Image (cartoon, grey):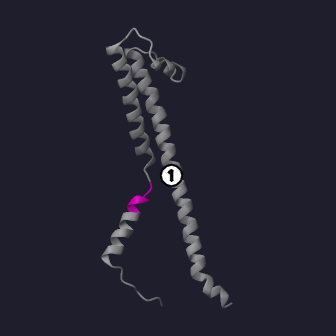
């Protein structure tokens, strides 16, 4: 029977900090957060351009190539915000999914390696 070892409070705080650092990300929440941030950024850039200098050419016109229905106008700001939200949602969701996947695979390999090292002595006696 394995002996029970006591963990001192400092080790416990390190373990809880590591658990927090490597906790899985919530995919939907990160997607919504990135989507909202990108939507606000595109809408704000369009509105600032319309207020400051509506007649001058501006690089925001390039968004017409990526966002269907976007123009540098007041309605275009809403259309651009819609498309930017969906783009940000997909990017945020994908990032969270890939990070969670990489962490899960890495944890699996570390656990498997630790179990193999722990059982090596047993297998040597067979």
On the image, which quarter does residue 22 sit in? bottom left
Judge whether 91 appears above or below 20 on screen: above
Q: Which residues are magenta?
A: 19-24
Q: How far from the left and from the top, in percent, is residue 21? A: 40, 59
Q: Quadrant of the C terminus?
A: bottom right
Q: Which residue is mark 1?
A: 99
Closer to us: 62 or 22? 62
Kindly identify the residue that appears in the image at 43 percent across and 21 percent down. Answer: 79
Q: Secondary structure at mark 1?
A: helix
On the image, which quarter does residue 106 sit in? bottom right
Judge whether 85 appears above or below 125 on screen: above
Residue 20 part of the magenta segment: yes
Closer to us: 100 or 12? 12
Q: How far from the left and from the top, in percent, is residue 68? A: 52, 20
Judge whether 30 appears above or below 43 on screen: below
Q: How far from the left and from the top, in percent, is residue 97? A: 51, 49
Kindly identify the residue that appears in the image at 50 percent across and 38 percent down. Answer: 90
Q: Which residue, as the protein is rendered here, is positioned at the far right?
A: 126
Kindly identify the residue that appears in the image at 38 percent across and 23 percent down. Answer: 45
């Amino acid at each position: 029977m394995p002996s029970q070892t006591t963990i001192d409070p400092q080790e416990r705080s390190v373990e809880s900090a590591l658990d927090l650092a490597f906790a899985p990300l919530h995919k939907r929440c990160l997607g919504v957060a990135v989507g909202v941030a990108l939507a606000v950024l595109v809408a704000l850039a369009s509105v600032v351009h319309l207020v400051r200098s509506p007649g001058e050419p501006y690089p925001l016109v390039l968004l017409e190539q990526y966002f269907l229905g976007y123009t540098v106008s007041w309605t275009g700001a809403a259309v651009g915000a819609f498309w930017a939200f969906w783009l940000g949602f997909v990017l945020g969701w994908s990032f969270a999914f890939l990070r969670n996947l990489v962490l899960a695979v890495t944890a699996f390999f570390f656990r498997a390696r630790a179990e193999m090292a722990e059982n090596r002595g047993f297998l040597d006696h067979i």
